[in-house]
């Protein structure tokens, strides 16, 4: 299921101001996430979510190419609860994901965005406006993500 967030006019959705931690324990405010004026993707996942892991693995296979072509950056936000947070770093390491990984053990970001189902992916433009969202994963859905990034950059 894909849904395009209309980004015309002045009603652009901004990222909520929630403080999360990196897997190394550093605090990060979500409303300051950026990619030096380039689009970025936020992918919500959990260690126990098989479709989430398949999606992040599929993106990992093409991430270097995506970065080279568009400069896009991916933030992966774990929605694992506090008692499972210790599983996130080993999972990321085992899958060799090079994304910036943040932890949302209390579900603050999940609640702020009204996320009901994972995997949940958003694309933000270079100014941090949420311009695209989708949930669920089917093989090949990552191709639509990079197409949306290309559209944002006028690279069609």
Image (cartoon, rainbow, N blue to C red):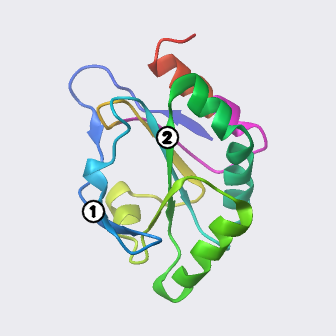
Nearest to N terminus: mark 1 or mark 2: 1
Q: CA distance from mark 1 to mark 2?
A: 19 Å
In front of the other: 115 or 43: 43
Quadrant the N terminus occupies: top right
**Which residue is denoted by mark 1 in the rendering?**
18
Residue drawn at (74%, 46%) of the image: 58
Question: x%, y% of residue 40?
Answer: 45, 38
Residues drawn in magenta: 130-144
**Farthest residue, direction left:** 10
Quadrant the C terminus occupies: top right
**Which residue is denoted by mark 2 in the rendering?**
73
Quadrant in the picture for residue 27: bottom left
Question: x%, y% of residue 103?
Answer: 44, 69
Q: Secondary structure at mark 1?
A: loop
**Farthest residue, direction right:** 139
Residue drawn at (69%, 31%) of the image: 143
Q: Residues within 10 Å of mark 2 (few under 14, many from 20)?
A: many
**Is 136 within the magenta?**
yes
Question: x%, y% of residue 21?
Answer: 37, 70
Question: x%, y% of residue 79?
Answer: 50, 69
**Is 12 within the magenta?**
no
Quadrant in the picture for residue 145: top right
In front of the other: 128 or 101: 101
Q: Classify residue 10 as left or right of residue 64.
A: left
């Amino acid at each position: 299921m894909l849904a395009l967030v209309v980004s015309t006019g002045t009603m652009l959705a901004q990222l909520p101001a929630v403080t999360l931690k990196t897997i190394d324990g550093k605090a990060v405010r979500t409303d300051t996430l950026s990619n030096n004026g380039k689009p970025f993707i936020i992918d919500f996942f959990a260690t126990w979510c098989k479709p989430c892991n398949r999606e992040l693995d599929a993106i990992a296979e093409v991430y270097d190419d995506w970065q080279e072509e568009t400069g896009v950056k991916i933030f992966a936000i774990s929605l694992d609860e506090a008692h499972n947070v210790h599983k996130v770093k080993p999972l990321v390491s085992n899958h060799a994901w090079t994304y910036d990984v943040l932890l949302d053990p209390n579900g603050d970001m999940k609640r702020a965005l009204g996320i009901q189902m994972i995997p949940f992916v958003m694309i933000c433009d270079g100014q941090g406006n949420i311009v695209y969202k989708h949930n669920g994963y089917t093989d090949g859905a990552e191709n639509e993500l990079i197409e949306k990034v290309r559209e944002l950059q006028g690279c069609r």
